[in-house]
Structure formats: structure tokens, C-alpha cells
Amino acid sequence: MSKQKNTNLKRVIVDFKKLTPEVLKLLVERYPDGYDDRNIITFKNAQGERIEAVEVLTEDTKYLVKISAKLEYTMENYDEDDYEDFEDDDPDAVMPPDPEAMQDDNLDDDDDDDDED
């Protein structure tokens, strides 16, 4: 029965540039420890390009959010308070992370991996 409900949902593909606080919050709630390969949906867009995305649902919409390093970093560093001054559907609220911060974070992760050897 739940599959029947899902067939009537509006389907929206969301790139990081169009990510809203509402969708970001849904992502963090659905994947609190991040997503992995079994959560990733792969499909071809209208241009025939291969897209990888993760899914979140609202009452009336199925969002397929394109996977990117920016998305992963933003989810890992999510703080609801950062978006309290914005509307839930404001696509300008979610700013791309600073590339230096992302690189520093990746360097920290690499250091952790070295300790395990």
C-alpha cells in the first residue's frame, strides 16, 4: 500500500546549488550517520548522464538529491541554528562549504587512516 502512495508523489531532482534548509534537514534526519552505497540511487538524466543521488520524502514530494563532496561535508557539519534566519524553501540559504575547510577536513580524515596501519 505504501508503494501506491509513493507513485503519486511529485519527483524533484535537487543539485547542491538548489538545496534548501528543509531538504538538508530531511537528509540529516534520514541519514544521521551519513549514507552509504546501499542508500544511493543511480539513474540517467534527460541528457543521458549517469546521476547518483540519495532519496528523501515529504508528504507530497520525493527528492533525489545529487551526491557530491559538498553535500557530504555540509551534512557532516549540519547545525540547524545556521538556518534559523532563512525560510525552509530558500535555495540561497545553504551555502557551498569553503574548499579550504573541506580540504582540511579531508586531510584530518587521511591522518586518521594512517593511524590504523
Image: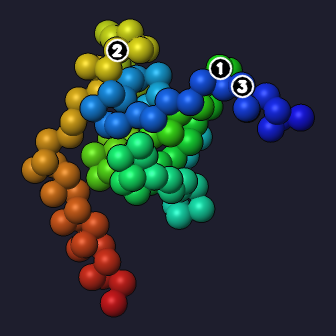
Could you tell me residue 80's position as x and y percent? 41, 25
Quarter of the picture containing the C terminus is: bottom left
List the single residue furthest toward the left. 100
Q: How many marks are shown on the rendered structure?
A: 3
Q: Is residue 103 above or below residue 113?
A: above
- In this orientation, does residue 11 appear? yes
Residue 8: image tag? 3
Q: Distance of mark 2 from mark 3, alpha carbons?
A: 25 Å
Towards the viewer: 50 or 114: 50
Q: Is residue 33 above or below residue 107?
A: above
Q: Identify the secondary structure beneath mark 1.
A: loop
- In this orientation, does residue 28 appear? no
Q: Amino acid at mark 1?
A: Asp
Q: Nearer the viewer, mark 3 or mark 1?
A: 3
Q: Residues within 10 Å of mark 1 (few under 14, many from 20)?
A: few
Q: Amino acid at mark 3?
A: Asn
Towards the viewer: 3 or 100: 3
Label located before the other in sequence (2 or 3): 3
Identified at 45% across, 40% down, the residue is 65
Task: Name the residue that disc number 2 marks.
Answer: 90
